[in-house]
Amino acid sequence: MAHHYTTPAIILDSHPQGELHRTVTLFTKEFGMIYGIARRARMPNSKLRGLLQKSFLGVVTLVRGKRAWKVVGAIEECNTYYTLRDTPEGRLLAARMHWLLLRLVKGEEKNEHLYAILETFSRYLVDQKNNEEYLPALERLTALRMLSALGYASLESTFLPFLQEEPITEEALQYVKQMQSLATREINKALEASNL
């Protein structure tokens, strides 16, 4: 019998495959970036039918297959895409952060710190959906944190105290907002170092 793995996950991308199946790109706490398939997930009576969408945040149950992971169960905590349906700027920001992660991370490698950054970002975005004033600062702070977690941010960065802590504070957002041009330069320098 196959071993089942249950782990917190965020779905970064999701596509139908054929008439019945769905392929998903997940960033998980236990395995990092993985690609999986949910067999028969698009059938009308499937338990996974409405769950495996982009921006899903919750817990998934996986089985390692010969070629790919198989998604056999899921419990959704929230979906930022649907929660932010009245906030297009927030939806766009979530999509940009997911795209950045897809570009930066290749292959399976556990990175709990990076998962915590993305989860904290998603929850903050949902909780503060009516506060669009800090969205540009939130984007810069999250990008800096992601790049730092992957080893691309400079250790002498003036943002270092805010890169280490996981909760997103108003103080951190205010600081990044005041120093936005420097934050943008730091992000661009780190992206150049990553060869993107």
Image (cartoon, rainbow, N blue to C red):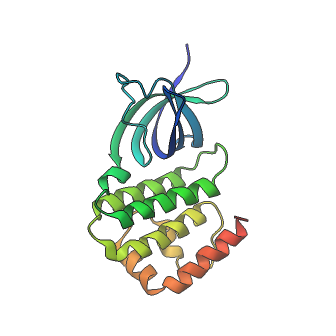
Q: Look at 36% across and 35% down and name the residue there.
A: 50
Q: Look at 43% across and 75% down and name the residue there.
A: 136
Residue 37 in view (yes/no) = yes
Q: On the picture, is 195 further left or further right than 174?
A: right
Q: Quadrant of residue 154?
A: bottom right
Judge by depth and name the residue closer to the eye, 147 or 87.
87
Residue sitting farthest toward the front: 19
Q: On the picture, is 30 further left or further right than 106?
A: left
Q: Look at 28% across and 71% down and name the residue there.
A: 131
Quadrant occupied by the N terminus: top right
Q: Look at 70% across and 65% down and name the residue there.
A: 194
Residue sitting farthest toward the left: 130
Quadrant occupied by the C terminus: bottom right
Up/down of 143 relative to 80, above or below: below
Up/down of 121 relative to 131, above or below: above
Measuring from the top left, give residue 67's x and y in whole percent.
67, 28
Judge by depth and name the residue closer to the eye, 124 or 98.
98
Badge count = 0
Residue 166 in view (yes/no) = no
Judge by depth and name the residue closer to the eye, 158 or 64.
64
Up/down of 53 relative to 4, above or below: below
Measuring from the top left, give residue 190's x and y in whole percent.
65, 71
Q: On the picture, is 108 further left or further right than 126?
A: right
Measuring from the top left, give residue 110's x and y in whole percent.
59, 45
Judge by depth and name the residue closer to the eye, 163 or 74.
74
